[in-house]
């Protein structure tokens, strides 16, 4: 037994020594491996040869007492892992290299750049979506009007209530509110947009109680004389509104307990122009009537100095530029001369309503205006029997002719 065990141990030792010796020979042969030559062959192309080499061993770092330890070279050493790249050169032969082809590097760089742009676009979309969700939605005018008429808080803007009650103009009423001179239900109100109901809310202006009842809407057609201005200022002695003093004086008698309305003109006529002008206390009506989008035509009779020829009519019809906007009249017509008149008359219809538009058109044609009178607004004509400086109240039919549907 002892002899067989000893023989087994000796055999194992012999095999271990043989294995170590074999591994040492393989290691030495790998380190001193000569250059190898490989070739590829195919049926369609001749064989191509290329060389395979191995990187030299990495030199060991030697400490330098004076300079300290030196950094090791990262481009050489047995620990470096080299990936061989087999590429076809410009001569058509295959060769082995340790760096990837330039085309592959460019493709990788392009792919990385594209992915970054894609992420950037995605982030922009996310930001836009977040902004869209936080911003209030836009509604059409019809939708806002429907909401205001059916769902918005009832009442009228405070500044509008004060102006309709005859306190002052809309702008002056806003200044009174900003100055803290208006109280609503015992509290100072500094916001002109506050909605109030005079029949329910207690409103004071400069210590005076505002009447609960609002004045009725007033619509007057007035034949403006020459020399009067379309201003509602209190210090203006020759204003168009002052021609309605008789109407305002009889207001308390005809409408007891209702505050006197504050009247103003719809649009303007210059001091030298006569004819039709509308006076009212309805701000919505005035805005609708004077706004350019309403496209209401206005007819004027211009009396000019001298003779009028065809070239003058052509020049007027071509229009002129006023405040940077080219204005063209709707029509121009030379009226028959009256038997006792020495001057020619022109009928000019416009719709823009620019300041001094008719005067500028006639001046551009080389003519001089002697007198100018407005005789029609929309479908409403100045009554022929209405004297200068006189007025008449408009009925529903007249309001409809002016384009007012409410």
Image (tube, rainbow, N blue to C red):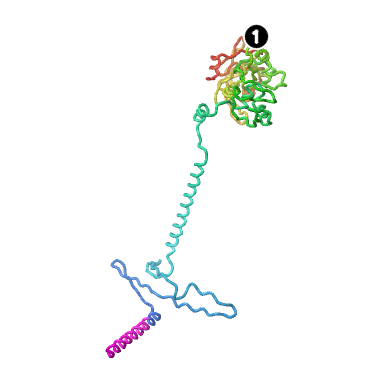
Q: Identify residue for label 1.
A: 340
Above or below: residue 198 compared with residue 116: above
Asked if one can make out residue 360 in the rendered structure from this viewpoint, the answer is no
Furthest residue in direction bottom, as rendered: 3
Residue drawn at x 49%, y 51% is: 120
Quarter of the image with the N terminus is bottom left
In front here: 296 or 396? 396
Q: Is residue 10 left or right of residue 321?
A: left
In front here: 199 or 274? 199
Is 8 a magenta residue? yes
In the picture, residue 317 is in which quadrant? top right
Residue drawn at x 44%, y 74% is: 79
Q: Position of residue 203 (x, y in %)?
A: 64, 25
In the picture, residue 168 is in which quadrant? top right
Q: Main secondary structure of the magenta part?
A: helix
Magenta segment, which residues? 1-26
In the picture, residue 327 is in which quadrant? top right
Is 192 a magenta residue? no
Q: Secondary structure at mark 1?
A: loop
Residue drawn at x 42%, y 71% is: 82
Asked if one can make out residue 89 in the rendered structure from this viewpoint, the answer is yes
Above or below: residue 92 compared with residue 270: below
Above or below: residue 177 compared with residue 136: above
């Amino acid at each position: 037994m002892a002899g067989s065990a000893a023989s087994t141990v000796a055999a194992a030792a012999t095999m271990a020594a043989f294995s170590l010796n074999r591994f040492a020979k393989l290691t030495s042969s790998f380190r001193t491996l000569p250059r190898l030559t490989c070739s590829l062959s195919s049926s369609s192309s001749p064989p191509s040869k290329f060389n395979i080499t191995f990187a030299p061993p990495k030199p060991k770092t030697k400490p330098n007492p004076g300079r300290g330890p030196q950094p090791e070279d990262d481009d050489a050493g047995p620990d470096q892992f080299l990936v061989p790249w087999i590429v076809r050169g410009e001569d058509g032969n295959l060769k082995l290299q340790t760096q990837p082809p330039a085309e592959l590097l460019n493709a990788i760089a392009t792919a990385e750049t594209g992915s970054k742009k894609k992420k950037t676009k995605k982030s922009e979309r996310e930001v836009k979506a977040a902004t869209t969700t936080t911003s209030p939605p836009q509604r059409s005018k019809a939708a806002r009007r429907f909401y205001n008429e059916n769902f918005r808080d009832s009442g009228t803007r405070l500044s509008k209530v004060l102006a309709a009650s005859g306190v002052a103009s809309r702008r002056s009423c806003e200044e009174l509110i900003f100055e803290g001179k208006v109280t609503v239900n015992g509290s100072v109100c500094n916001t002109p947009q506050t909605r109030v109901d005079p029949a329910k809310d207690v409103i004071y202006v400069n210590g005076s109680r505002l009447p609960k009842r609002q004045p009725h809407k007033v619509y007057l057609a007035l034949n403006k004389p020459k020399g009067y201005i379309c201003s509602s200022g209190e210090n203006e002695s020759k204003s168009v509104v002052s021609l309605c003093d008789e109407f305002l004086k009889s207001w308390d008698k005809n409408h007891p307990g209702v505050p006197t309305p504050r009247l103003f003109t719809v649009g303007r006529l210059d001091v030298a122009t006569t004819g039709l002008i509308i006076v009212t206390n309805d701000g919505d009506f005035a805005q609708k009537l004077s706004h350019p989008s309403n496209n209401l035509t206005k007819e004027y009779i211009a009396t000019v100095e001298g003779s009028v020829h065809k070239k003058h009519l052509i020049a007027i019809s071509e229009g002129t530029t006023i405040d940077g906007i080219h204005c063209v009249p709707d029509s121009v017509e030379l009226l028959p001369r009256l038997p006792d008149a020495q001057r020619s008359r022109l009928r000019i219809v416009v719709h823009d309503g620019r300041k001094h538009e008719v005067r500028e058109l006639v001046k551009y044609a080389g003519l001089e205006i002697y007198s100018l009178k407005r005789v029609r607004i929309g479908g409403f004509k100045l009554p022929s029997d209405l004297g200068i400086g006189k007025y008449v109240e408009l009925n529903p039919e007249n309001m409809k002719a002016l384009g007012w549907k409410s």
